[in-house]
Structure formats: structure tokens, C-alpha cells
Amino acid sequence: MSTALRKLVALAAFQVLVLLGWAAHHERVRATAPTFRLALAPVDPYDVLRGRYFILDPQDGNVKIGRDGAVLEAAEVERFLRGEPAYNGPAQVGFCRVGEQERLCALARMDAAPGAGPARFWSRARVTVFHEDTVWRDGQQVPEPGWRVQADLGLERFFLPNRAELPGRENEPGWELEVCHRPGLTPLPKQLWFQGRPVTFD
Amino acid sequence: MPREMNVVLRHLRHWRAAGLVSAEQEDALRRASHELAQSRTSGGVRAAVAILGGGLVLAGLILIIAENWGAIPRLVKPAAWGVLHVGFLAAAHGAERRFPGRPLLAEAFALLAGGWLLAGIALVSQIYHLAARPPDGLWFWAALVLPAAWVLKRRATAAVLFAALAAALTAELGTRDSWIHATRADGPWLWLAVPLLAGFAVAWLPRPVELLRGWLGAWTLAVSQVFLLVLGAVQELDRSDLGNAWAVAVAGLAAAFVFPARVLPATWDALTGRLVLGLSLLPWVLMGRQYDAGGLLDLTAVGLAWIVQIGVAVLVIRAAARAESHVFVNLGYLAVLAGVVTRYFDFFGNYLEGGLALTLTGALLLFVVYALERARRRTLARESA
């Protein structure tokens, strides 16, 4: 085998193994990691570059504490803030079982051990916490003082086959995402669920 | 007329003047060379067809996978990607040896292999619904392509790497959590610096793309002209806040100032390259972060933009005429025309009401176009002589 050919084989092996190794890593996570389900408020757009996909918009990605059915409590937010007026940065978010779903129920700084509370799964997220005096409801600004917690869970898109028929409209309630738990990382999307049933595209 | 014919004709005239060939011989030689030149498809056309072919195959394969996404099992997709990628690399390698007279065939396969790597990254991201930062995916692409520049030693690989670096830098500048995120980039700094920096990086590869320097020159001229014309016309600048993106701007511009022969066209001498860049940025250097409507320096900057715009175009025409570059002579005259027309509407736009004003404007524009076309032809004729 000539030197040029040997180099070509090494290049092909490097490029293919890196990419397939990356895919294999995620395949292993899908096959072995424990999973849980998160509630969604999805949007179903289409663009030329990405094709058809759900913008996942997890329901616990943006909550007002004490409202909107939030499970996270003000005391937990204040413990997390450590006396600071606001927070914006990476953090650990804990999920507790509520019915068939996991809901955001705990926060911890990256340098802290996750609390000993009821949270079963802890994931990494980018968290923003601030105090909000008013909110917009039905086009009107109404006084509603409290903590606003935004958690970017890294769950942005779920790609759909272009001709897939969905079991319900995107704005119907009951959409969930089953995710693989990756300790210290953001959850990995695995499967869509609708009204308690897994969505398959076969 | 192909550029090589200009050279032949110049030599023939010289030989005829020196009495080395007769008029008949000169005529016969001219006809023979002309036939030869006409019989060849130009390198540019062949390269364009090769790029188009490679690009269409790439787009077609991506579409086939997208259209049959549900039908192709999840694990088969990356496996098929791997098989095809090995095939493209082997074809790039084999085409060079099997068809030594068709180097663009190997270039087309190398281009395909480079683009296919990005398709592979997108494929894995879609299969597993990954939500990583877009610039990370582009850096990943650049890192995977990089060793191919030494193994394949193809210009297409350098072109792919240039695209990857320019795209990654641009995405990084536009990503909020990036260290080099540019909050507001209303000046020409990054528009000039990003391609220059990417071009500078790939200029050191074993097989750089010669055409890239010409493209970077055209891009630099276009960005310079557009920003100078817009600044001169609107006479203001929105806030510019580059933050750490200054590091990219400084690196790209410094690379072009220090090594103009690496990034700017061969038809521009080093001084022209530096002057084009320096003059294009001068109004923004004077204005700073934001235009101050009452400031003398800022008013000077706007006035300077009018002069510099024409000055840069003239500099490019002058350098291109010396280096016998039709393309840059034409681009330079186009820039002069754009400047004249913009200034005309800038100054007299408010008075252009009624049929007479429009007729006079049309006549004036026709005269300007005629005069510039005459000057352009004269420049090209001087170049040929």
C-alpha cells in the first residue's frame, strides 16, 4: 500500500470513526439511560434547512412561582439565590414525579451538591431567576409579584418526518417528551408522547 | 477575448515592430493562436461546472435522505453516510490518478467529501435531536476537514475549510453566549475581517485556493463600497458595539495589512491592498462607536466617506490596469458609477419633481455611463497595448 493510500485510509478512518462514534455515544445513551417525561407546549414549524420539527417549549421552561401550576416553590428559589436578587447562569435543575410526568421542583448551583429533596433526576440547564412585579394576562399588565424562573433545558427541537401524521394538533394539550437522563448534562430527547401514548412515525 | 490572447497579441505587435515577423506571418500566427484559444473552455467555466456538479450531488443526496427519513432505519442513516463518505474520499484520490488530465474531477469529489462531512454532522444532530450551539457544529466540521487538507492536497478542501471557518466565526459572533459575541456590528469591521481572517488561515495550507484571493478582493471592494455609499447617503451610523469581537476584527485586518500577498488579490500590489482597507475604515475610525450629529469629526467622517468611496475605486482601477486584470478594472468602474449615481440622487433627489427634471436626470445618467464606459475601454485598451 502506497504512502498516499495509507494516509487516505487514515483520513477516512478518522473522519468516519469520529462521526459514527459520536452517533454511537448517543445511541448508547438512548439504549441505557433512564428516561422520564416532560410536559410540552410545542409549535410545529417547517423550514427549508431543517425540514419539519417541533419547537419543544417545555412547560417548566418558563414559570411564575406560585402560578401557572408551577411545582417549584418560592422557598426553594430563595435558597438557590443565596440572598442575591437574581441569577443568570448554568445550574442544576431537579425533577420530581407528578402523575406520569416529571416537573421542575428543585434548583442547585453548579458548585453545590443537589439537595436531598424529592427530586429524582438532576440535569444541567441555563437558569435565569428574577423578581417580577407584574405579568401580562389577556393583553393587560396586572400586578402579580413573585419569582420568574426560566430554565433552558437544552430541549429545543424534535425533528419530524416530513409526511408524518401526528395524532393531534400541536396546540392540543397532552404533548410530552420522553427524555434520556444524562447526569450533569442536559436531557437527551428520545420520543414524543401524546395524551399518554408514545407517538411513532412508522 | 481570452486573457492569454492579449499577451499573444502584444508579443506579436512587438515582434512585428522589431522586424522579426512579416505582416503575413503575424496574421497567420494570430489566427492560429485565436483558434487554439477559442477551442478551449475557460478554466473558470470548468471550475464552475465542477463546483455545480459536486454541489448538486451533495444537495441531491441530502434530499434523498430527507424525503425517505421515515423509511430509512435510524442506524442505517449514519452507516450509509459513512459508506458514501469513504466512497467520495476514494473517488477524490482515484480520479487524480486515473484521469490526470481532468484535475477538476478530483476537486469536485474533494468538495463533495468536505460538504458531506457537514451533512453527516447535521444528520447525527437530527437523528438525536441535539440542541448544541450552532458554531460548535461548524467548528466540529472545520476540525474534521482540516487533516484532509494535508492528505488530499486539493484546492476544493481549502475552499471547504474556508467556508467552515468563515461560517463558524460568523455564527460565533452572532451567538449570545460566545466570548466574541458582537452586540451591535453596524460598521464594516467584521464584514471585512471575518472573510479575511478565514482566508488568511487557509492561505497556509499545502494547496491554497488561488481564486480565493480574487474573491476576497472583490468582497473587500464590495463591502467597502456599500458601507461608504450608505454612510455617505444616510449620513449617520447606528451604535456599534463589538465587545470582544474586536479580537476577530483586529486579527482579520492585521492579517491583511501585514500579509496582503496572502489574502488580497495578486492584481493589487501590497500598497493598494493596505490603502483600500485603511481608507475604507477611516470614516469609522473617526466616528468611533456612534455617530454624533453635531460633532465636527463625525461630519468630517461623512464627507470623507464620499471622497474615499471614489478614491478606493480609482485605486483598484489603477492597480488592476497595471496588472492587466479586466475583472477588477470593470468592478472599479462599476464602483465609480455607483458613487456618481448615489451622490447625484443624494444631492439633487429632493429637486427631482416633474418631467423635465426626470428627463435631465436620465440624460445626465446616460452621459455619465457613456463617459465611464469610454474611460473603461480606454483603460482596457492601454492594458492590452
Image (cartoon, rainbow, N blue to C red):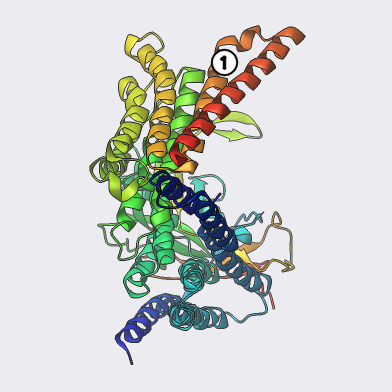
* Residue B58 seen in the current view: yes
* Residue A123 seen in the current view: no
The residue lying toward the viewer, choosing from A110 and B278, is B278
Crowding near the residue tagged with mark 1, few <14, some 14–19, many ≥20 C-alpha atoms within 10 Å:
some
Task: Classify the position of the N terminus of chain A by image quarter.
Answer: bottom left
Q: Residue lying at the far right in this picture: please name it.
A: B355
Seen in the picture, residue B343 relative to B264 is either above or below; the reply is above
Give the residue type at disc 1. Answer: Tyr
Q: How many marks?
A: 1
Q: Residue lying at the far bottom in this picture: please name it.
A: A1
Q: Secondary structure at mark 1?
A: helix
- Chain letter of the residue carrying label 1: B
Question: Which residue matches tag 1?
Answer: B344
Q: Position of residue B186 (x, y in %)?
A: 43, 31
Seen in the picture, residue B101 relative to B39 is either above or below; the reply is below
- To which quarter of the image does residue B142 belong? bottom left
The residue drawn where x is 37% and y is 74% is B152
Q: Residue lying at the far left in this picture: please name it.
A: B258
Q: Position of residue B18 (x, y in %)?
A: 38, 46
Left or right side of A21 for B124: right
Q: Position of residue B145 (x, y in %)?
A: 38, 68
Left or right side of B324 for A138: right
Q: Position of residue B197 (x, y in %)?
A: 33, 48
The residue drawn where x is 29% and y is 57% is A110
- To which quarter of the image does residue B320 belong? top left
